[in-house]
Structures are given as structure tokens and as C-alpha cells.
Amino acid sequence: MNAGRHWGYPILLAGMPATLVAVFALVEALDVPLLTDPSPLLGTAGPAAALAGVALLLIDVAMPVPSSLVMVANGALFGVLPGTLLSLVGGLGATLVAFGLGRRGRSLLLRTTTPAQRARAEALLRRYGLLAVLVTRPVPVLAETVAVLAGTSELGWRRVALAGGAGVLPTAALYAAAGATAQAAVSGTVAFVALLALAALTAALLRRGKAVHGTEGGAERRPDPVRDAAREPAGGG
């Protein structure tokens, strides 16, 4: 076995977040107006502002766009429902772009990982990947990393799109409501409310997952001689 074929996942899991954080720090140091406060670009309500809002959320995959400010601006300019839909389109688009990047990188991963590593990663992603995509969508850096990692697995586009949409929707709606009501206090509490909602959702999904695996584990359940003996029909041969 080639001793060098083991660094693919460490690079992906550590290198990508480190790169995004470094880009974020650089943008902050340079004080790039578009990326520190994109609200002037959005201007007044209209097709150009709608396209700009969606585009900013899309490039958040690679650039440190303040997505919360963009989503609040969408709500302020277009109202709660249209603002939510625009942010949902942009956030879901970012999920699929990151997922697509992971798909494109699968050939590189094949050359930089061992079959055992890929088997373990595939098993974890098959079991927890969709949940991870869902709950990390509001979390900067982690959201992009998880979506790219999901793209390296056998997870399908439709299922990832559904998970990504479910993860983006609550945050998009809360920020749109904050912008539409023009209440500064709301903007400050949106993140807290979103985290509470996501924590409750995560707990519920994990409980459901454990229940399903406990009752339908099939081959994954360990043999239990006492249990199996109790299930054997009584009677002689």
C-alpha cells in the first residue's frame, strides 16, 4: 500500500476550513466594502437587487459574505415571503455548488485516500451526512465543508437538496422577518432563536434515528445468544 495515500480527508477536513478562515481574515484586514457590508449593492427593491442578493449568497461558498446581512436586506427590500424565497434560493444554491465541488473532487480523493478510509467515511456519511448538511447550513465555514464532504460520497443530489433546503429555510425566514419588521432588536436575537430551533430539531432527529436503528438494525445488531434462544420455537425434533 502506498504510504502517501492517506492525507485526502485530513486535508479536506482541516485545510478547507483553514483556507476559508484565512480568506475571511484577509477580507476583514483589507476592509473590502462589498464583503463587509453588501447592503449598498442591493440598493432598492427590484430585479437587480434580487439577483444581487442571490448571487452574494452563492459566492458565500468561497468568499466570506455576511449572509445574515444579505438575508436581512432581502426581507427589508421585498418583504417576509419574497425575502425568504430569495434567501432560500441563494442558500440552497450555495449548498448545491459546494456539493458539486465535492463531486468534482472525488477523483482526487481516490488518489489520496485508502479504500479503508473511504469505506469508513462513506458509512458515516450515509448514516449522518444528510443530518449534518441540514444542521450546519446556518454555520459559516462548517456549512461549506460539510456540503463538499457530502459531495464526495454516494449521497444523491435530490436528498442533499432537500436537506440543504430544510436547513436554510428557518434561518432565511427569521432573517427576512427581521428585515421586514425593521426592528434592530429582532436582528440581534435571530441567531439565538435559530440556534434554539436547530438544537431542538437536531435532538428530535437524533432520537428518531436511534429509535429506528434500534428496532430496524438488521445486520448491524450484535448477536445476543440469550435473546436468540428465547426467540427459537420450543419443541423437539
Image: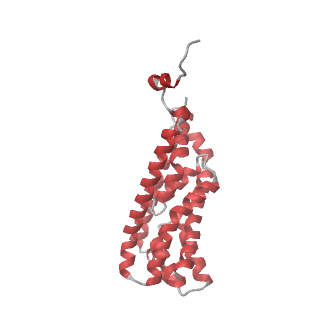
How far from the left and from the top, in percent, is residue 126?
56, 45
Which is more toward the observer, 133 or 105? 133
Q: How many marks?
A: 0
Instruction: In the displayed orientation, state which residue is furthest to the top.
Output: 237
Which is more toward the observer, 174 or 114? 174
How far from the left and from the top, in percent, is residue 164?
55, 60
Compared across the picture, whether 150 is left or right of 204 comes to: right
Rendered residue at 42%/63% (across/down): 197
Which is more toward the observer, 210 or 50? 210
Residue 162 visible from this viewpoint: yes
- Tell me where residue 188 sits by quadrant: bottom left
Rendered residue at 55%/83% (across/down): 78
Please determine whether, in this image, residue 176 is positioned above or below residue 210: below
Instruction: In the displayed orientation, state which residue is furthest to the front.
Output: 235
Q: How is the image coloured?
A: secondary structure
How far from the left and from the top, in percent, is residue 54?
57, 73
On-image quarter of the C terminus: top right
Rendered residue at 56%/68% (across/down): 58
Residue 62 visible from this viewpoint: no
On-image quarter of the N terminus: top right
